[in-house]
Image (spheres, grey):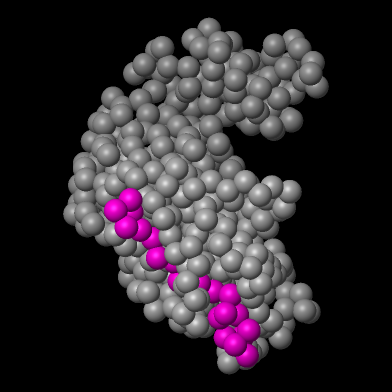
Amino acid sequence: MTGHRHRPILRAMKRSGLLLLIFAATALNPLRAETESIDLKALAKKARPAVMLLVISDANGKEIATGTGFLVSSDGKLITNHHVIEGAASAIAKSENGGLFPVEGVLADDPKNDLVLLKLKAKDLPFLTLGDSEKIEVGTRIAVIGSPLGLEGTLSEGIVSAVRGPSDQASWIQITAAISPGSSGSPVLNATGHIIGVTTWLLRGGQALNFAISTVPVAKLITSVIQSTRITPIASHTSNKNNSLSDEDEIQTVVFNAIENKKYALALKLAQDACNIHSSSSGAFYSLGYANFFLGFYDDAISAYRQSLRLKADSIGVWIALGESLSALGKHEQAIAAVREAITLAPTNTSSWISLGGLYNAAGDIQNAIQAYKEAIRLDPRAWLPWWNLIGVYFNAGQQEEGCRALQKAKELSPKNVEMMIRLGKNRVFAAKVARCLGTDSSN
């Protein structure tokens, strides 16, 4: 875990307020019928002809994976998950009536949301249409048609149990319908047979938690190719790198890199796969917690961090990350206790004291927040971040003069970082107070 263990804390400080859970919209009249009943026979008859089993092969023609996709146009445009085609040299789509359609290539890709739009060599095919997933409500009855373990046309039903995800990203729909290996890329359908999501991953723990991405990025992907017919061969579009992660540093590096590139779904899948393969790896569960934290799934992040600590109780970075996740849920006392544990393990660790200051500040304990930041400064007089964090604490306490002194000290230590933080800041009140300290116009 060397070199990575404090990334969640620093990122959380830089992106404070980003990871907020969002929930389904209030009930709308057109959706109430969906929550009551669903005609599965009619739905299957309508939708199954447009759902395909995907068989993925490597450069030697050997089958390496299967998945599911669904048609969104009569000329063979097909949506599936990005991870389904990773490492592929070729792919074939098989319909429920046995028809085989070669995949010509990739029309558009969205790894961040784990989506890809493929083009089949076909015409005059049945296809599905998108519904409005932004209006979906918790409790809506849904159905999923996929190809678990290669068994195409398999129908399962359930309800929408939650709509979650960070506010600046597309929503994730949590469903109770079964998802198994091979179901990736399956359409989630409402009672009228319209697509409201695309299954992408599941978490295995005390219970199976199944997730689908909303139709918002799906619609964008389809729209992006309306005026284009350019097709990229799968072999040149995907990487043949083996994603089986071996050691803790490798696991964390790959997951962190995926998150830095905003490939959140891929990061979560890689971390979950690593946990399934390396169930005794503290680092694997730390990575899983980290991925969940960035998606705003704080409860799941906390569970993963605690499992990591059960496997390795002296991991300072995991204790700090656990505290950040607990704080995000408003569990301030538990959060502070977690970071205090990190400080007990390493009293001179500056990051622990910076995190503790942030947790006290979030809990409204200004004096203890100031003391924690000052301890970080005592331990590392060259650190600019605790001085920067002190600015907001002093401003919130009405101590403008002390805040200005902290700002000046932060600028002396790291002018470039402070300028960047001022430029990226979105809080107008804070910006006005900073401008007053600097003697500049905050509207510029």
Q: Position of 365 compared to 2: left or right? A: right
Count of marks, rendered view: 0
Figure quadrant of the N terminus: top left
The residue at the far top in this view is: 412
Name the spot of residue 31 as percent of width and height, x first.
72, 78
Magenta stretch? Answer: 42-61
172 or 362, nearer to the observer: 172
Name the spot of residue 17 as percent of width and height, x first.
59, 42
Which residue is at 37% across, 29% downward?
Answer: 351
Q: In the rendered view, would you say 211 is above or below 89?
A: below
Is residue 201 inside the magenta stretch?
A: no
- Is residue 323 something one can see in this rendering? no
Name the spot of residue 206 as percent of width and height, x first.
33, 70
Which residue is at 55% across, 36% downward?
Answer: 15
Figure quadrant of the C terminus: top right
312 or 220, nearer to the observer: 220
Name the spot of residue 34 as percent of width and height, x first.
67, 83
Which residue is at 72% across, 82% downward?
Answer: 32
Q: In the rendered view, would you say 293 is above or below 405?
A: below
- Is residue 382 something one can see in this rendering? yes
Which residue is at 36% across, 69% downward?
Answer: 181
